């Protein structure tokens, strides 16, 4: 299980909960949210995307509304595996799974 470093007092709403789920994976060693800034976009939902491969893992960008925040992952996984973990731990995918289970009952 990895660790979540919380070195900033402000984060995008819902991001820490998502990052905690990601950090619970054995393959991810450290998750560090970085700087928070404003942008021109207006996406309503929280989105996490891989942007750059670093020496120790990957740099991701979290976006919601007009805010964007860097997230650094320390891991040995490749990009496709990180995308899979992002999809599996995403708040959106959790809701879809719960909804589809209810329909089956």
Image (spheres, grey):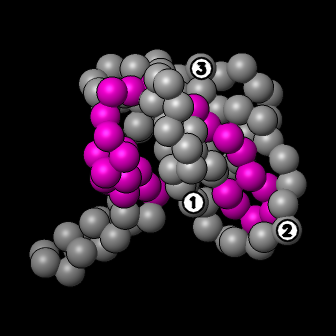
Q: Disc 3 marks which residue?
A: 5
Residue 30 picture location, percent across and down: 47, 21
Query: Nearer the N terminus, badge 2 or badge 3?
Result: 3
Give residue 40's mark: 2
Query: Nearer the N terminus, badge 3 or badge 1?
Result: 3
User: Front-most of 68 and 95?
Assistant: 68
Image-based side of 30 in relation to 105, left or right: right
Q: Quadrant of the N terminus?
A: top left
- Tell me the quarter of the picture where residue 105 sits: bottom left
Magenta residues (range): 63-91
User: Front-most of 42 and 83?
Assistant: 83
Q: Disc 1 marks which residue?
A: 47
**Distance of label 3 from label 1 (alpha carbons):** 20 Å
Asked whether residue 31 appears in the rendered view, the answer is yes
The residue that appears at 71% across and 32% down in the rendered structure is 34
Image-based side of 81 in relation to 103, left or right: right
Residue 27 picture location, percent across and down: 29, 27
Q: Callout 2: few (<14), some (14-19), or many (20+) C-alpha neighbours within 10 Å?
A: few
* 89 lies above or below 6: below
Residue 14 picture location, percent across and down: 61, 49
Q: Callout 3: few (<14), some (14-19), or many (20+) C-alpha neighbours within 10 Å?
A: some
């Amino acid at each position: 299980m990895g660790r979540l470093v919380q070195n900033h007092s402000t984060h995008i709403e819902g991001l820490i909960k998502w990052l905690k789920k990601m950090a619970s994976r054995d393959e991810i060693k450290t998750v560090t949210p970085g700087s928070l800034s404003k942008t021109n976009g207006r996406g309503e939902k929280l989105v996490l995307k891989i942007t750059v491969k670093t020496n120790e893992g990957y740099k991701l960008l979290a976006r919601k509304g007009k805010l964007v925040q860097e997230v650094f992952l320390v891991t040995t996984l490749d990009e496709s595996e990180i995308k899979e973990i992002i999809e599996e731990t995403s708040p959106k995918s959790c809701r879809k799974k719960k909804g589809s289970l209810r329909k089956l009952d």
